[in-house]
Image (cartoon, rainbow, N blue to C red):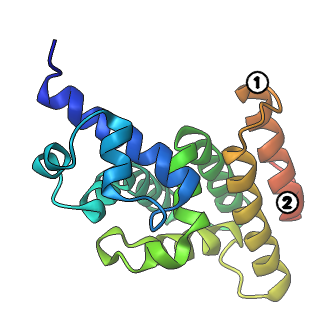
Amino acid sequence: MARSASALRGQILESALRLFAVHGFRGTSLQDIASDAGCSKASLLYHFAGKEKILTELLTPARDALATLLDRVAGLAGGRLVEEAVTGYVDLALRYRREIRLLFEDIAEMSCHQDLGVLELADGLLDALAGRSQQAPARVAAWMVLGAVFITSATDDEVAPDEVLRAEMIRSALRTLDHTPS
C-alpha cells in the first residue's frame, strides 16, 4: 500500500532529523534522506525544495518555542528571570532533543540560515541565563549552562528517567549560575 503524501512528508522529516543529528547538516545529502525515508530523491524534492527547506521546517517549532520562552521572560529580572530561563530552557532541550542538538552542534552552519534567527535567539537565552548581567562571571556561567544543558539533553545514554533528569538539570544549572531557587 502506498503511503499518503503527509505520511511520506513526515517520514522524510523524521529521516532528515535523525541523519542531521548523526552526520550534521552538511554531512547529509538529499539522497541519504530519500534512501532512509524509502523514497526517491525526486519524490523528496516534490515535497521539499531542498535541504534548507527541510532544515527550516524541522527547526521552526523549536525556534518558535525558544522565542516564546524569551517573550515570557522578557519582563522578568533577577532571580525570577534566571529560574524561568533555566526551567524553560531545560524543558525545551528535553522536548526538542535532536533539534537542539542540531542547532548547537553546528551553530556556524545554522547561523547562515538567516530565516531561523538562531544567533539572536541564542544571544537572548544567554542574556536571560546570565540574569541580564554583563559581568564575566555571570556570562561564563551562562555559557556553561547553555552548553551543558544541550549536551545532557542530547545524550543517547539514558542517565535517568526524564523527570529525574529534568530536576537534576535545573538544580545543577541554577547552582552553576550561583542561584538558589526562591
Query: Which mark lies nearer to you, 1 or 2?
Result: 1
Using the image, tell me which numbered label, if any, was put on residue 7: none
| Residue displayed at 86% across by 81% down | 137
Of 35 and 125, nearer the camera is 35
- The amino acid at mark 2 is His
Q: Which class describes the residues within 10 Å of circle 1: few (<14), some (14-19), or many (20+)?
A: few
Image x and y of residue 4, in percent: 14, 23
Q: Residue at label 2?
A: 179
Q: Is residue 5 left or right of residue 67?
A: left
Q: Nearer the viewer, residue 132 or 44?
A: 44
User: Does 163 appear above or below 30?
Assistant: above
- The picture places residue 17, in percent across and down from the top left corner, at 44, 46
Image-quadrant location for residue 25: bottom left
Corner quadrant of residue 179: bottom right
Estimate the x, y position of residue 24 in percent, counting from the top left: 52, 61
Residue in the image at 40% along x and 40% along y: 15
Give the residue at the far bottom of this rendering. 135
User: Left or right: 7 with respect to 108?
Assistant: left
Task: Give me the residue at 17% from left, 30% from top.
Answer: 6
Q: Which residue is mark 1?
A: 161
- Above or below for 177 versus 19: below
User: Which element carries disc 1, helix, strand or loop?
Assistant: loop
Does label 1 or label 2 sit earlier along the sequence? 1
Q: Amino acid at mark 1?
A: Pro
Locate residue 47, reporting x and y percent: 14, 46
Position of 98 with respect to 16 (left or right) is: right
Q: Residues within 10 Å of mark 2 (few under 14, many from 20)?
A: some
Relative to 132, residue 41 above or below: above
Q: Quadrant of the N terminus?
A: top left
